[in-house]
Amino acid sequence: MNDVAHDEHRRQLLREMLRIRRFEEKSAELYTQEKIRGFMHLYVGEEAVAVGTLQALDADDAVVSTYREHGHALVRGIPARAVMAEMYGRQEGCSRGRGGSMHIFDAATRFCGGNAIVGGGLPLAVGLALADKLQGRARVSACLFGDGAVAEGEFHESLNLAALWKLPVLFLCENNFYAMGTALARAQSQPDLHLKAASYALGAEVVDGMDVLAVEAATRRAAQAVRGGGGPYFLELRTYRFSAHSMFDAQLYRDKAEVEDWRRRDPIVLFERQLRAAGVLDDATLARMEAEIAAEIAAAVAFAEAGSWEPVEDLTRFVYSEGPAP
Amino acid sequence: MSTVTTTYREAIREAIREALRRDPRVFLMGEDVGAYGGCFAVSKGLLDEFGPERIRDTPLSESAFVGAGIGAALGGMRPIVEIMTVNFSLLALDQILNNAATLLHMSGGQFNVPLVIRMTTGGGRQLAAQHSHSLEGWYAHIPGLRVLAPATLEDARGMLWSALEDPDPVLIFEHALLYNQAGTLPADAGAVDIRRARVRRPGRDVSLITYGGSLPKTLEAAGRLAAEGIDAEVIDLRSLRPLDDATILASVAATRRAVIVDEGWRSGSLAAEISARIMENAFYELDAPVARVCSAEVPMPYARHLEQAALPQADTVIRVARGLVRGDG
Ligand SMILES: Cc1ncc(C[n+]2csc(CCOP(=O)(O)OP(=O)(O)O)c2C)c(N)n1
Ligand SMILES: [Mg+2]
């Protein structure tokens, strides 16, 4: 990359993080207006992880995600309006309104779902990778999951199998140090999760998940190793969620001071400062970015507002396939 | 008699508190039961009162902590294990079926498992297809388990202690829409009988047989049917395994018609089992075929209008009951 392209790329990373942040802020507002219902989990504070990891993937790679997946979906390229309409429950939503916030799906970008069973996505990623390996395709199956999933049996079974069969899985652990109200140290005998992963004989590293460039660089390296046939790779991305676990969480389990400490490492603020210092960003550019993002989100909300309800007669559609297997 | 104003949630909390005070072998264990206060706030405040040994937070390891509950029960404790929702209990299904339900029989009666497992069930809150299903009927299929579904404040308050006194594993299903149900209880409310179904509303024309989260809807339907001159009896099963056949059959023998309201899917459901028992034991008493109101056979959708269309509703119960009584569906 030459310098100009490099500068543009860094601005792009900032822009994507801002896009997630603003989308989440809007989602919270719409939730309080009861436009969005059900469970909703915000990604505020963790933006560098989604942007750094998913930007490093190819278009035909697969992504398996969690219920905290708005940011993943946006970076992956699912239109904001399709995600917003989904959260409204509209049939124009990417899952026809049947999934809601926790179950964003998009075949076009191989976004294989927000999964709301903790650890439930890991075996899927292993299977997607197995299919690629059997069919001789050099694709990566990336799987995002939280620190909480590391306590599930499915985590251990999946890492073992992927390593044993040398499958092209990229395990991306979003370690935000909490599983709902349970601090990592209260759940794990070995809280250095990459050490735990390493025991399955796969590449495993810890990365500063508040530093988007570090996340991107680590993911590129790891994805390259996986794509080259080196077997699975595990990244522990240390980050923090600034918002509550979900919209129902009184946050009795953590100190405000701890949240404030982490807020000082806000990945967007840090990166913005870095870009300004490098002379790559000025007020006008930032203002333009914010304006474009605001317009995109306003359009997404308008799209969702104007959307329609799937006819109730269609309720039982797609319980089984409507045509022959492809 | 003095009474207290309470909610379903508080009634369960009070039952847990009472159990912890009464029996030093009792402890509560599960995901986020302590510092977080319980994912449905049932155990809020108990950590401060009883400490982390007895209000025990676990990692996200359903199979491991349910299995540990079984082991602790074998070792002389009286654990109350909380699983956040029935959906996540599937990760512990192996422990519940292959260990909790079988050890006594497999060991020739040597090892009983005095364990209580509580979990949330049911839909209606737009939580889509991984947080909304009613799978208690599956558990009711399993010999070796007792399966309870408290639908009233009295049962929320009273079933836990009775379950703890049972020498074998008991599963208690709490419908998520019931937690905020408010009302009064006698100040000295305590253990209740867990073997019998209850007639919640007597009636002559049709028996509406239901349990758990469908009870309020069914009572609403019965109230509205009364306005059109149909006198419906409402039976609250309370225990899904074993079923109280005597109460069901006595009611059906008197009304000669039955509608079963069950939030599970129709195929292979608890409703199917009850229907079969009525057919086997009261066929000649019936004036009409047994009818069922169940959830549509789809994974639960998120969008509210679709979810409501998928769930049993009072309107449907009314239409079906009217059809049986008047023969005009
Ligand atoms: C198998 C299972 N158990 C419990 C839950 C309830 N639950 C939803 S999110 C969550 C915390 C998960 O924490 P983590 O994996 O660290 O992800 P984070 O929310 O921090 O992104 C829990 C316990 C669930 N969805 N699935
Ligand atoms: Mg976490």
Image (cartoon, coloured by chain):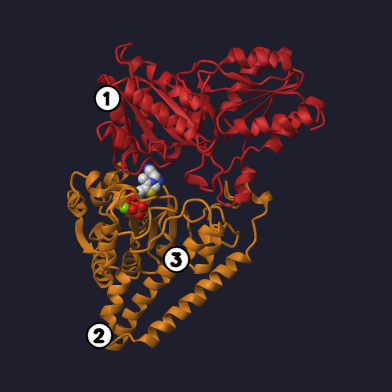
Chain colours: A orange, B red
Give the distance between the C-alpha atoms of the residues marked 3 and 2, in whole angstroms: 28 Å
The quadrant holding residue A72 is bottom left
Give the distance between the C-alpha atoms of the residues marked 1 and 2, in whole angstroms: 60 Å
Give the distance between the C-alpha atoms of the residues marked 3 and 1, in whole angstroms: 45 Å
Q: Is residue A168 visible?
A: no
Circle 3: residue type: Glu
Q: Is residue A95 left or right of residue A122?
A: right
Q: Is residue A17 above or below residue A85?
A: below
* Residue lying at 45% horizontally and 67% vertically, measured from the top left: A23
Which chain is mark 3 on?
A
Determine which residue is flagged by label 3. A25
Q: Which mark is residue B72?
A: 1
> Is disc 1 surrounded by few (<14), some (14 to 19) or many (20+) residues within 10 Å?
some
Determine which residue is flagged by label 2. A278
Estimate the x, y position of residue B212 in percent, counting from the top left: 55, 30
Estimate the x, y position of residue B295 in percent, counting from the top left: 60, 38
Circle 2: residue type: Ala
Q: Is residue A306 above or below residue B49?
A: below
Mark 3 residue's CB less than 8 Å from ligand 1: no
Estimate the x, y position of residue B6 in percent, counting from the top left: 50, 32
Q: Is residue B20 visible?
A: yes
> Helix, strand or loop at disc 1?
helix
